[in-house]
Amino acid sequence: MRVTINKVKEMKQKGEKITMLTAYDYGTARIVDEAGIPLILVGDSLGMVMLGYESTIPVTMDEMLHHTKAVVRGTKQAMVIGDMPFMTYHISVEDALRNAARFIQEGGAQAIKLEGGVTVAEKVKRIVECGIPVMGHIGLTPQSIYQFGGFKAQGKTPEAAIRLLKDAQALEEAGAFSIVLETVPAPLAKLITQKIGIPTIGIGAGIGCDGQVQVINDMLGSFADFVPKHAKQYTKLTDIIKKAVTEYYDEVKAGSFPTDKQSFTMDESILAQLK
Ligand code: KIV
């Protein structure tokens, strides 16, 4: 049985910290699932860390679904959350419903995530009414970087802080089961967490959130372009991979790979007939 939204809400009530990680492929999702991470987000960050786009904006529904299906195939216990890409839920409620449904029906996800607060509350309400669990996402919402003027912390002025609190409350009222708080000052994230009944999942939002999320490539050190301030590298896969690839290159060049161990034999008599 996969993790349910009831379980996630219960974790907040019990004061149990919630962990979420992104995953974009079968193999990684399988490892994350087996490690017991309850929430796996197929984030539109895949556009940057997997596909090499400069931002998340070019990511399409088809790309998201392709990766969501792979992650679902690799998991047994985690709730898989599909991230609605840019402009797939902004134009109309109908659009938002159709695309949210695709994540569940075609992708096999158990929930969706979308960016925004008050402005998307009506869409969140309708998606939830249709039986699809929704995770909100406020603060530094990467699909709005052009509006923000870059990847900047949000909620630092009194007006912006009040706006974020109202966004969180609007999402809770609309029926979201949890909210990602991205790059929000830690004391504000803590206050929002205390003021709402649903769990907050922080990324660059301090220890006061009910849970934490990281982009897996950031924490594994497998994304070489940059390391965001909110990321902690638990290992540095780029170095490990580069060392292995260089060793392979050197061995092939030197004629020391493959050895008998990686080769197959055949009956000498058959070979003799060919000769
Ligand atoms: O796309 C993503 O990976 C995200 C997380 C950073 C929350 O939205």
Image: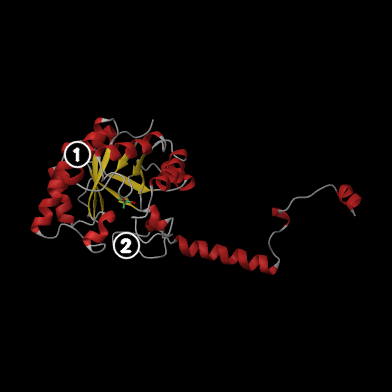
User: Going by the image, does 191 lie left or right of 201?
Assistant: left
Where residue 31 sits in the image (x, y, percent)? 45, 45
Where residue 14 sits in the image (x, y, percent)? 22, 37
Nearest the camera: 42 or 63? 63
Residue 69 falls in image quadrant: top left
Nearest the camera: 65 or 235? 65
Where residue 118 sits in the image (x, y, percent)? 16, 45
What amino acid is at disc 1?
Glu
Residue 257 falls in image quadrant: bottom right
Residue drawn at x 12%, y 46% is 166
Where residue 86 sits in the image (x, y, percent)? 31, 50
What amino acid is at disc 2?
Pro
Mark in front: 1 vs 2: 1
Residue drawn at x 12%, y 54% is 161
Q: Is mark 1 within 8 Å of ligand 1?
A: no
Examine the rendering and report whether any part of residue 44 can be seen.
yes
Give the mark nearer the N terminus: 1 vs 2.
1
Query: Quarter of the image containing the N terminus?
Result: top left
User: Going by the image, does 271 lie left or right of 22?
Assistant: right
Examine the rendering and report whether any part of residue 234 can be seen.
no
Residue 130 falls in image quadrant: top left
* Above-or-below relation of 108 to 146: above
Residue drawn at x 56%, y 62% is 244
Can you identify the residue that label 1 sits on? 122
- Category of crowding for the residue at label 1, using alpha-carbon neighbours closer than 10 angstroms: few (below 14), some (14–19), many (at least 20): some
**Marks 1/2: CA–CA distance:** 32 Å
* Above-or-below relation of 186 to 136: below
Q: Could you tell me how many numbered marks the image carries?
A: 2
Can you identify the residue that label 2 sits on? 228
User: Going by the image, does 255 lie left or right of 230?
Assistant: right
